[in-house]
Image (spheres, helix red, strand yellow):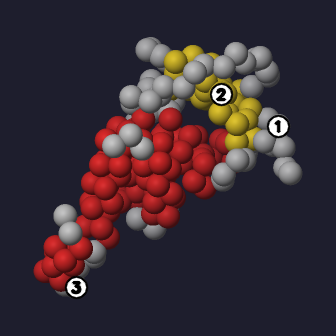
Amino acid sequence: MNASLISSELDAGEGSDPLPLLNRHLIGALKALAEHGEADHACRLAAAAWSCLRRKRPDEAEKLNRLLHALTRPLTLQQKETVMTEARQLDVRDLPPAQRHTLIFDRCARLGSGESLILVNDHDPKPLYYQFEAEQPGRFGWEYLEKGPAAWKVLITRKEAA
């Protein structure tokens, strides 16, 4: 799709909100980027856009959240050996998906420096990783403890202040 076609679509909707159209085109571009071997880059851009929209336009942010989940399904990380600590566990498997990220962000915001929680989810929470990195780069550690299929467990640790 070229710029003049996007401009025409925006002009045709004069007076209406252009954000949904722009978001749709961004999502299409991010999918194409991922299909060409740049899934990590696409995820970082999607998470940055999600971060910009999540408070004032949660409807559009949710579309980016769904994209992050779709893009991260095929990605895998080499599991690290982790020493278990006295981390609290947060099991979100029984919560509606729309409520999970809000709760997780709230709980992680309450962690003190060096404190951890173990997130238990029913799918790979990799989209959440990208969202943390978009909003608070380098402030949280992320280590897989278990990688499905019934449960995914991730140790999330607030890093010491530099």
Query: Quadrant of the image for the N terminus?
Result: bottom left
Q: Which of marks 2 and 1 is in front?
A: 2
The residue that label 1 is drawn on is 114
**Left or right: where 58 falls relative to 140:** left
The secondary structure type at the circle numbered 2 is: strand
Callout 1: few (<14), some (14-19), or many (20+) C-alpha neighbours within 10 Å? few
Q: How far apart, in angstroms, are the residues tagged by discs 2 and 3?
A: 47 Å
Is 131 located above or below residue 85 in the figure? below
Residue 23 image position (x, y, % from top left): 32, 62
Q: Which amino acid does label 2 sit on?
A: Glu
**Left or right: where 48 falls relative to 32:** right
Residue 13 image position (x, y, % from top left): 17, 79
Tell which circle, 3 or 1, labels the residue nearer the N-terminal end: 3
Question: Mark number for residue 26?
Answer: none
* Residue for point 72% across, 47% down: 139
The secondary structure type at the circle numbered 1 is: loop
Between 38 and 27, the one lying in front of the other is 38
* Residue for point 31% across, 47% down: 31
Question: Mark number for residue 143?
Answer: 2
The residue that label 3 is drawn on is 15
* Residue for point 66% across, 51% down: 137
Is 136 located above or below residue 160 in the figure? below
